[in-house]
Image: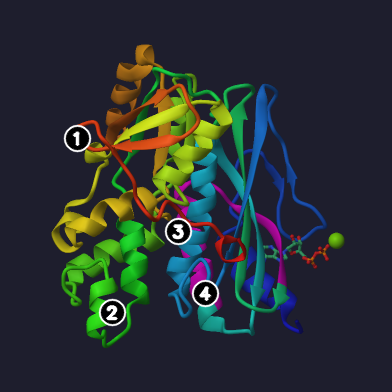
Amino acid sequence: MAQEFTIIERYFRDSGLQFSRPGIDLGIGDDCALVSLEPGYQLAMTMDLLQEGVHFPGAAPPALLGQRALAVNLSDLAAAGAEPLCFTLGLSIPGVDQDWLQGFSEGLLTMASRFDCPLVGGDLIQGVLQIAIQAHGRIPTGQALLRSGARPGHLVYVTGTLGDAAAALAMLEAPERPSAADDRQSPFQKSRLSSKQRDHFSRAFYCPEPRVPVGVALRGLASAAIDISDGLISDLGHIVAASGVGAELDVAQVPLSGVLRECVKEEAQLPLALGGGDDYELCLTVAPEHCSAVEDAVAALDVRLTRIGEIVSGNAVQCLNNHGEPVTFEHTGYNHFDSEE
Ligand code: ADP
Ligand code: MG
């Protein structure tokens, strides 16, 4: 792209995104960035690749997109118990749209400054809109939260509320003038949501809160953790598989927001909360002796934490209703390769 270096300078190097931070010795401008890690720390690395039309709706507001793109990566650091250090950005854009770049850069900066995580490098090409972010964090050696530590008898918890981001996607993708068939398909009771409800869902999708302080507080206390990107059943399924155990989910305990309860059809609430992705809350397992320490630590951070089940022997996630009877849900998570199966 002819203007490649001007774009990098204006929107990524000189936009405030490359602020200084202890440990970052060299950022944008050379062949590599240089990072120092104190002795006793491990580097945590994670990457998420987002494509327009697949991971976010076409014509998504650029500032919200920038915010979300970095947030989903910081969420992976949170799930490992890592503190953010810096990030790199691989960006593919269809053309040079200055307003879009300005908005996107500002959105990134919102998250970057909140989590003290400067941009240190990247790459820029012309193509379909794709955003690849690699986030780096640090963690005291040996203290990372993994998916593999859950054991029978451990309790399963989740932060925040679930299902709001999946409801948001249904809202964002709804046709302007829904037909009667669209209304039947829709998870919402009414096709018109109030502006307060729209704001709530829009925030849930575009501005997920990376649970970084929670992840840090869980070091040494949680036996396993994961962030919920594909849906609770699917993501708890990863903990269960990695740990060689099963889980029983008490679905009546799964936390739903007031807004979701108020405007989503009753029969659609649990499927959204259990199967819908994009909430970026943490799902964790805790041995009984650490439960009160975990509950206190998360309460001190003003984050809602709900006990939703228990790890058992076995190899699957089983959902139980409030009579303890097994229930099944059709849609159990997003799989990028579903259509090829
Ligand atoms: P190279 O050819 O050595 O890979 P580039 O010419 O692609 O380097 O990039 C020049 C500098 O700008 C590098 O320091 C690179 O990390 C940085 N950079 C490129 N694209 C971006 C971007 N989208 N965001 C931040 N930094 C970028
Ligand atoms: Mg080079």
x, y percentage for residue 111? Answer: 47, 55
Circle number at residue 182: 2
Count of picture labels: 4
> Real-space Cα distance between discs 2 and 4?
20 Å
Are the residues at dot 2 and dot 3 in contact (C-beta closer than 8 Å)?
no
Residue 210 visible to the viewer? yes
- Report helix, strand or loop for mark 1: loop
Q: Which residues are magenta?
A: 101-124
Determine the residue positioned at 42% across, 31% down.
284
Q: Is residue 216 left or right of residue 288?
A: right
Q: Nearer the viewer, residue 287 or 29?
A: 287
Amino acid identity at mark 3: Thr
Q: Nearer the viewer, residue 196 or 89?
A: 196
Report the residue marked by disc 4: 53
Foreground label between 1 and 4: 1
x, y percentage for residue 20? Answer: 61, 48
Determine the residue positioned at 29% across, 46% down.
161
In which quadrant is the C terminus drawn? bottom right
Report the residue marked by disc 3: 110
- Report helix, strand or loop for mark 3: helix
In which quadrant is the N terminus drawn? bottom right
Report the residue marked by disc 1: 322
Determine the residue positioned at 39% across, 58% down.
207
Amino acid identity at mark 4: Gly
